[in-house]
Image (spheres, coloured by chain):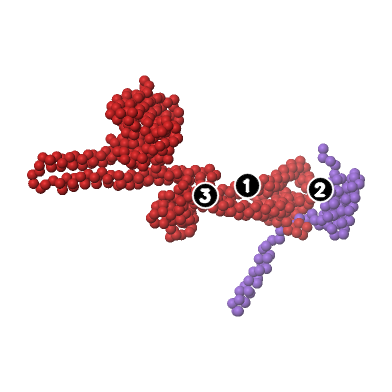
Chain colours: A purple, B red
Amino acid sequence: MRVLAAVLLCLAPALPAAAAGEEAPVRVTSGTPEYCGALAARFAAVRRAAPPDARALAAEGTRLCGRGHVRTGVAKLRRAIRLAAPEPE
Amino acid sequence: MDPSLPAVAPSGAAAAVPRGGMAPPAGDRRERAPRGPGLPPPSGEDLAAGPPPAEGPLLHLLRSAGFRFALLFAALFAVSILAFALVLWWGTAGALDRQTNAVLRADALALEERWREAGASGAAEAIEERLAVDAEAESIYFLRAPDGRRLAGNLDRWPPEMEDASAVWADLSVTHDGQRSEARLHAIRLPGGHRLLVGRDVSDKIRLRQLLAEGLIWAAGFALLFALFGAWLLRRALETRLRPAFRTAAAIAGGDLRQRVRLTGLGDEFDRLGATMNAMLDRIDRLMAGVKGVSDAIAHDLRTPIARARAKLEDALRAAPDGAATAEEARALRAAIEEGIADLDAVTRVFQALLRIAEAEAGARRAAFAPLDLVPLLADLAEFYGAAAEAAGQRLETDLPASVPLTGDRDLLLQAVANLLDNAVKFGPPGGTVRLSARALPGEPGPAGAALVAEVTVADEGPGIAPADRARAGERFFRADASRNTPGSGLGLSLVLAVAHLHRGELVLEDARPGARPPGLRARLRLASG
């Protein structure tokens, strides 16, 4: 038992160190409420020229982001911006 | 020479004497009992099972040709499945990977171009624009300043795995919307120490690839099962088809020469192999029967003249006085010795005839073949047998063309026709006519496949040969009941038949006068050239 306890004691400080060495994967930041706000601001810049569908999508996306459905809200805002963007020649 | 005729009897329709007519039909023998003399043969299964079990089952299995064929089949099947899977993988999952790489490379080049046109702010704006319209949320960007700051993009930090400037491509796990997903990343260096990272979330593609891999693995597993089943079927089919040949060979090896390979009637390679084996065994059977027949005949037919000669010599010995003999006793003794010598000469002639038949049947005389004209040869025979016919109160008529060319053995042909003429004179009635004729044939196909070019016919007015006896007339020592009292050894027609076969021809026996009594006998010796 003493030997087992000694081994556990030796390992105890090592385990947190190992966990610290294992770096968390990089994170994609385009799924946050902040990014939702950034997209809403970008759409506002082109809102005047945007078609009604795009406006509706943007409004819905903003509302979803406000209710916490960030992923869906971001997707709708992106679709709205895509619709509002001028067609490439 | 002893050109004696086999037994004759009232005859019917014509019949050709078959080659090796001594053997019974092969079809009869196929139904016979499988056991013959000698030790019991090993069974087909024993042979199919192969070498002794001391080798071990694995080695025995490897030695099986059926197993090797099956293994080859399974290997080919597996290789084809593997090739199919590789092509399918390369065309689907590989195409998706190549497509992702191409998109990333093109996007990075476009941003690099934008950098050159508008600098860092222009490239950053382009990145933000791209992210703003990425409704599928698949794009990943990171524009890093030389000091490590993020100028644009949607990653919280530069991936540590791509810190090294030489790292251009990487597959990494990223956290996207709180969930772990996989991303394909491509990094390039920009002027001024900036670096650009372009990536795509490939989780969906990876899931598709996993589904494809699972499908392929299942398909390969089933294909392998089918391959093994097919291999088992192949091996079993081979063993089943070869088993009759094994069994027959085993029975033959065990001494039962009557066994034959059972044919399926499909006419495939195995049937042809079986038919060839059966033909070979029929031939061996005929030869064995011939040897046995000759041995039996020699033992039976030569015992009589030898015993007779011995009895005469013993009588002479008993009758001879111990002292000086009178002239009468000396003459009797001399006559007995002469008769004994005559009997022994007859035995010698039989042996000579047997040797000649054996030579002709073995084809050993074929080397003596030479071009010849049959007509002078037949004319000489007609002259000789004309005198013999006259002595018997008969007449010999000839019908010979100017020439009948042929390539053959002169001595044997002379002997064969002499045998036919001798028989005709011997069995023809007094006052009867023996007819000798010859003609050239137009090359019609003979029984051995060769073109027949000459025909010699000898016809008499004797009792003929019964149709039932004609097939056996070529057997050595065969004598019908009606000819038992006529001098002869039963070898005359055997030699004629052997000469016909040596010349790839045939001997046809038929009634000389159909419907008449006696019907007479017409013997037609039909010959091919060379």
Chain for numbered disc 2 = B
In the image, taking residue B347 as reference, residue B61 lies left or right, namely right
Relative to residue B435, is residue B180 depicted above or below?
Answer: below
Q: Residue furthest bottom?
A: A1
**Pointer 1 with pointer 2, Cβ within 8 A:** no
Residue found at x 39% / y 42%: B22
Foreground residue among B271 and B396: B396
Which quarter of the figure is the C terminus of chain B placed in?
top left
- Where does residue B529 sit, x and y in percent of width and height? 39, 28
Residue B406 visible at all:
no
Chain for numbered disc 3 = B
Mark 2 highlights which residue? Answer: B133
Q: Secondary structure at mark 3?
A: helix
Mark 1 highlights which residue? Answer: B84
Respond whether the residues carrying marks 1 and 3 are from the same subunit. yes
Residue found at x 41% / y 33%: B517
In the figure, residue B335 lies in which quadrant? top left
| Amino acid on which disc 1 is placed | Phe
Q: Count residues near mark 2 (Cα–Cα under 10 Å), then give few for <14, some for 14-19, many for 20+.
A: many
Q: Nearer the viewer, mark 1 or mark 2?
A: 1
